[in-house]
Image (cartoon, rainbow, N blue to C red):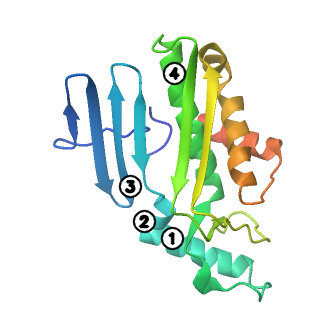
């Protein structure tokens, strides 16, 4: 599925994919994009990927510079404790891609009844939500545990028809873990521009 420069899921170049008796798989390690996925004939899909804001040095450095500028008024922040950054808009893109990919599989009759989504991000204790310099950012939103994890059963018909709405609900769930509560209208605007190629 191609919504931006990096496909979801990404199909690796020659030598970066394989086939088994009942699955296909692919992997990549390119400029901060580190991922592995496997899709079984049973319908189970596993996708492991890194936080690009952490594994892509330029991305991480740009966010760090932006956040130090935005939050320069807050002299209580110990920047040495901040381990990494989760970029606000990129998070919207990722959740949108996950749900849009699943909805397209539903529309092609890959799934019936319901799907179970199990989404986790690990190793993010003392990560903060961040923005680049194109968007104002005035508060510190820091996560204090090592794992964020959620599991949902979603009807396949509903997903095929309402993937954008469902993904927005999970986007807000994710941001709430950091204590950040943007308006649904803002999420909808950013997501709509992404899906229409206007980002």
Location of mark 1 (residue): 60
Q: Do tag 1 and tag 2 residues touch (Cβ < 8 Å)?
A: yes
Between the C-alphas of marks 1 and 3, the distance is 13 Å
Residue at 45%, 14% (x, y): give it.
110
Q: Percent position (x, y) of residue 191?
A: 67, 40
Q: Do tag 4 and tag 2 residues touch (Cβ < 8 Å)?
A: no
Q: Secondary structure at mark 4?
A: helix
**Vertical arrangement, residue 24 with respect to residue 31, above or below:** above
Q: Secondary structure at mark 1?
A: helix
In-front residue for pair 55/126 = 126
Pick the quarter of the image with the N terminus.
Answer: top left
Q: Do tag 3 and tag 2 residues touch (Cβ < 8 Å)?
A: yes
Q: Earlier in the sequence, mark 3 or mark 4?
A: 3
Location of mark 4 (residue): 104
Location of mark 2 (residue): 56
In-front residue for pair 16/65 = 16
Answer left or right for 106 relative to 133: left
Q: Secondary structure at mark 2?
A: loop
Location of mark 3 (residue): 33
Between the C-alphas of marks 3 and 2, the distance is 7 Å
Between the C-alphas of marks 1 and 4, the distance is 32 Å
Answer left or right for 82 relative to 179: left
Question: Can residue 187 be seen here?
Answer: yes
Q: Earlier in the sequence, mark 4 or mark 2?
A: 2
Q: Earlier in the sequence, mark 1 or mark 4?
A: 1
Number of residues whose C-alpha sits closer than 10 Å to that of mark 3, classed few (under 14), some (14–19) or many (20 or more)? some
**Vertical arrangement, residue 60 with respect to residue 120, above or below:** below
Q: Earlier in the sequence, mark 1 or mark 3?
A: 3
Q: Percent position (x, y) of residue 108?
A: 47, 12
Q: Do tag 3 and tag 4 residues touch (Cβ < 8 Å)?
A: no
């Amino acid at each position: 599925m191609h919504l931006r420069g990096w496909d979801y899921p990404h199909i690796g170049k020659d030598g970066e994919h394989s086939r088994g008796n009942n699955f296909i798989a692919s992997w990549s390690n390119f400029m901060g994009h580190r991922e592995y996925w496997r899709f079984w004939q049973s319908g189970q899909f596993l996708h492991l990927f890194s936080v690009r804001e952490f594994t892509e040095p330029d991305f991480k450095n740009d966010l760090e510079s932006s956040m130090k500028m935005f939050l320069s008024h807050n002299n209580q922040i110990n920047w040495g404790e901040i381990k990494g950054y989760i970029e606000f808009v990129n998070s919207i893109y990722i959740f949108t891609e996950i749900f849009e990919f699943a909805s397209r599989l539903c529309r092609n009759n890959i799934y019936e009844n319901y799907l179970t989504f199990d989404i986790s991000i690990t190793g993010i204790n003392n990560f903060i939500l961040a923005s680049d310099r194109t968007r104002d950012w005035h508060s510190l939103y820091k996560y204090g545990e090592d794992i964020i994890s959620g599991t949902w059963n979603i009807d396949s018909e509903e997903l095929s028809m309402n993937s954008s709405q469902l993904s927005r609900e999970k986007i807000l769930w994710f941001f709430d873990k950091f204590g950040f509560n943007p308006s649904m209208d803002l999420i909808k605007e950013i997501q709509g521009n992404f899906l229409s190629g206007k980002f």
